[in-house]
Amino acid sequence: MGEPSAAGAAAIPRRRLLFGVVGIGLCMVSIDQTIVATALTAMERDLHAPLNWASWTITAYAVGQILVVSLVGKISDRFGAKQTFVVSVAVFTAASLCCGVSVNIYELVALRFVQAIGGGGIMPSGSGIVSQHFGRDRDRALGLFSSIFPIGAVIGPILGGIFVTDWSWRGIFLVNVPIGAALVALGMRFIPENPRRQPASPDVRGIALLALCLLPAMFGISFLGSGSVRVDNPVVVVSLGVGIGAGWLFVGHVRRHPAPIISAEFLLGRSFGLVNLINFMYGAAALGFTALVPLYAEERYSMHPLEAGTLLTARGAGMIALSGMSAWALRRTGYRSPMMLGFVLMVGSLLLLAMAPPALSPYRWLALAAGLMGLGLGVANPASNNASLQLAPNDVPANAGLRNMFRQAGAIMAVSVTTAMLARSGDPGIVQAHIFLFFAALLVATMPLITRIPDNRGAW
């Protein structure tokens, strides 16, 4: 993307309206990520689906997002960020409607994948719109834009619990329809046109290799959790083998191709490679696995779905409490200090979640732990977001898409491996507690990498 225009930077009232439109879109996607976690048990029961296949409603959504976010930068260059945003919202909305009327788990998983194609385009294209129209304030604006995500984290579990308790899990998808329809109309009316570039032809082979890397590997992990399936089952071996082999070919492809789906520098460059690794670990330990906290509360402590869902609300409330302040303070703090503090708080949260409540009731103990996780995310999120964006400030859509890709990949691995293990376990609650401890150790191992990322104080 080109540099922000002076006219766009000067139109303050219009900028605020624009920020509100794309911010609501981001909030809608955030709601959809947290709202589904509260309904896994209800979907499993109503659609007669095994837990590991019910969890694919989360996994398929994450896989679809990974595939599309890697394309959004080039799509925005060719068609404009406005068109990309509006079409993404329209696809997301139509797929949400279809998800709400699906009749079996396999249809629902397929529709969630389509929904992800729309949802995956909203944050990168929205980030490009914000970057284009906020001039010298784009660092703070992008930090605040990414901080909208916690609002959905608060709303989602509450809505999910209400719908599951008083109506049906189908309502968690149908709620998107009026919001999405309004956003399409507002986006067409109020988002200005952005400059376009003419990128090279789409990297079809790169897209195919990326899909072959992700989908078979995730299917193999999910299939492993079905009943008494062994690790040497031919389906598992072939699926994982194809995924690993395609991943190896994909890395070689981006190094040789003149215009790959993902730039080799963005993927493997020294600074980008370090940030990508941190984002993968961050997505696995903090974003992916904690989406299963309501399931943990139901399995280990027999909590009601509505009560369990409000634990994610506690996490979201913690994020809201600090994320805006953290985003505004980045020019003074830089990126390393808030990321380190945030990781420390997240490790503490995971340790508390794994422990049996020593004095408080299970709900209050888990709410305390979830709130601490939210505080950690609120401190770390704006810094970790801008730490990657400032490496290529004129390619914000592609850069934001890459960041989301690695976080979603980490989340996929966390959710898929966890649910596969739970499906084979006689005591899912205790097993999940042990996995909390593993992810706490993973975040501790990641913290030394933070000291090596490029730091920055001031605008970029």
Image: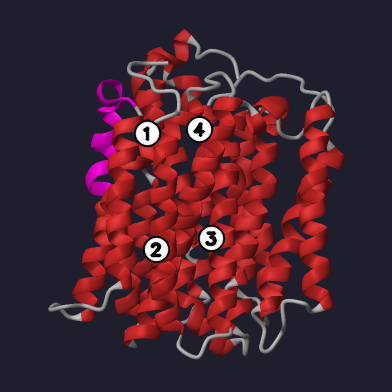
Q: Residues within 10 Å of mark 1 (few under 14, many from 20)?
A: many
Q: Residue at position x 48%, y 46% from top? A: 25
* Residue highlighted by disc 1: 383
Marks 2 & 3, CB-CB < 8 Å contact: no
Q: Residues within 10 Å of mark 3 (few under 14, many from 20)?
A: some
Nearer the N terminus, badge 3 or badge 1?
Answer: 3
* Residue highlighted by disc 2: 156
Q: Is 116 placed left or right of 438 in the picture? A: right
Q: Nearer the viewer, residue 302 or 124?
A: 302
Secondary structure beneath dot 3 equals helix
The C terminus - image quarter: top left
* Residue highlighted by disc 4: 127
- State the separation of the CA atoms marked 4 and 3: 23 Å
- State the separation of the CA atoms marked 2 and 4: 22 Å
The N terminus - image quarter: top right
- State the separation of the CA atoms marked 1 and 4: 15 Å
- The amino acid at mark 3 is Val
Secondary structure beneath dot 2 equals helix
Q: Nearer the viewer, residue 413 or 45?
A: 413
Q: Which residues are magenta?
A: 320-334
- The color scheme shown is secondary structure
